[in-house]
Every structure is written in C-alpha cells, then in structure tokens.
Image (cartoon, rainbow, N blue to C red):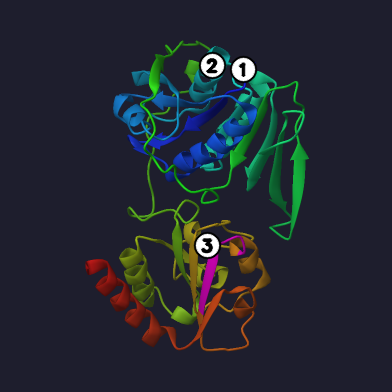
Amino acid sequence: MTKDILVFIEQRDGAVLPAALQTITAASQLAGKTGGKVVAAVIGKDMGAVADKLDGSGVAFVYVADDAALAMYNPLKYTRTLCAIIEKADPQIILLAASFMGRDLAPRVAMRTNAGLATDCTELDIEGSGALVVKRPIYNGKAFSRVHFNAGRRQMASVRPNTFAAPAGGGARAERVSVPYAADSADDRQTTKEIARTGGGEKDVTEAAIVVSGGRSLKSEENFKIIYDLAHALDAAVGASRAACDAGYQPHSRQVGLTGKTVTPQLYIACGISGAIQHLAGMRGSRCIVAINTDAEAPIFKVADYGVVADLFTFVPLLTEAVKKVRSH
C-alpha cells in the first residue's frame, strides 16, 4: 500500500456534494502526517466538469470512472467500480462523506477490500505507528468512542458532514487517471431506472450548513411559511420537531431527532421547539445553536449558544428581513 489518502467524491447530476469537498480537507490533514498524497475517486457519466472542480483543492490525482452505465447511483456497480479504483490507486486510507450514499457504499467496499471501517467520524488523526485513529459519537451523541485501526491493513472511514471546512483552494491542477468501467453479468442484473427526488427542491437537513427548524408552536402547515422564508434567506434547510411532523405540519423526511434525522450544521435555529430529549439527540452536534421560544425555562435553552425569549411569529419575520437586508449589500 502507498501512504496516499483516497477520497470518494460524491456527485449528483454533476454537482459535487459539499460534504465530499469537506472530506478532502480531512484527507489533506492526514496526508500531512502520513507523507502521502490526497487522491480522489469520481464515478458517473460525463465527469470531466466534476474532475475540474477538484483542481486547486489539494488533490494530486483524480481517478475517473466515466461511463453511461454509471449515470445513476447503483450500489453494486459503484461498489465494483470504487474497488477497481482502490486497487489501482492502492491507498492506505479511504474516506467518504457520511451521506446516504456514503453509508450505503462504505460497508460494501470495506467488505470487498478487507478494510477496517469506522462510520460518522468527527475527528481523524494518525498515531505514531502510522495507523488511523478516529473519534465518533455513540449513544446519540452523549458519548464518544475512539477507534484505533490496524496499520497493516487498509483503513476506511466516513466523515460526518460539516465537521471540516471546504478546501481553501489555490493548489495545483490534479492529474487525471482514467479507470474503465468493467461490466459484470451478476451485478448488472440490478438496474437503476430512475432516481426520484422528494422535498420540492428544498435542501436535505443532513447536508445543509444551516438548518431552521420549527416545532408544534407553529400550529399549522401554513404557518411554516415563516420558517421557509427564513431558511430561503439564509440558503438553509427546513427541519421540524417530531411533534410538528406527527401533527402533519411537515413531512417526516424533515424530522430532526432520535426517531428522525441527525444533523450537524454550522448553524441550527430552533423556532418554537421546547427541546425534548429525542429532539436534542438529533441536533446537539450542531456548531452553533440559536433557540427562539416564549418559555424562558424551555430545555432547548440549556444547549443553545444564543437564546431569544420572544414570540416566533413576531421575531422570525423580523430576523428574515434583517438577513435579507444584510445579504442585499
């Protein structure tokens, strides 16, 4: 094995997932300690423009698998293709974003390449022996575990979105390496015909840098418009508490919490959410938490970095207008 760090660059319709770019930053930090290079794997159709987006990010080589059969994500085809890239690049460490695709792909690739795997990591380091050491949350973020890898084996980890910043840029152009797609009759029996997107074009809460969530205090689906207005002004995703989703104010795909989705944005704004334990379990990893609630004793204020004791129907529209004014300059 080389000392290189390989990053799988997830893309959707030619748009690179921000969490994938953030993972390059984590890889660069590790490469500085292993003495290796950062290399990237790009899989899909017409991937030239995607590879160009990695120039200047610190990536030395981009391994590109470009084929019409890879136009849409297929777990069997992508697993086989990424394994082929790994065999050619021969990296010591493989990193993926802990997205829905990353969670599906990582264990499949780890099994085929006989690699150790740790998921949803928030810290990565190299110990004296040259082995990867990662920190990952357990028990819904109430505790953390440190995972030590075997330096003699390939090491693999998925990185929680919004844990690292995107690359600063300014580096050299990455060299392209073409990896042909090899069809396989067994895997190709499974075909992806269509990927249907839901959410009306809104951002997914698990991938957004900013999330604005509303609770049952919104009282109706129509009143969630003020949450959407603020989210659009901030270029954020819209989330909701379980109580709001159970009441039918928002679809459960937007639910944040223990029985919903875990989010780790740079900024989390909780509007009219009291802070039940199950909700806190899903957002306590946020970098900065702002709570807006009329109840000064609400549990949400115990985890908030900034608290606003106010009526959300009055305060949120004012905040939206302030954001729009700042962004207009």
Label 3 sits on a secondary structure element that is loop
Give whichever of discs 2 and 1 has the lower sequence position.
1
Give the foreground label among 2 and 3.
Answer: 2
> What span is in magenta?
284-291
**Residue 289 falls within the magenta-colored stretch:** yes
- Compare marks 2 and 3 and give the one earlier in the sequence: 2
Mark 1 sits on what residue? 2
Give the labeled residue for mark 3.
255
Q: Which residue is mark 2?
A: 89
Nearest to the eye among marks 1 and 3: give it. Answer: 1
Question: Residue 129 at what x, y percent from top left?
Answer: 77, 28
The alpha-carbon separation of the residues under discs 2 and 1 comes to 8 Å
166 lies above or below 182? below
Label pair 2/1, CB-CB below 8 angstroms: yes
Quadrant in the rendering for residue 220: bottom left
Placement of 168 over or under 221, stated as above or below: above
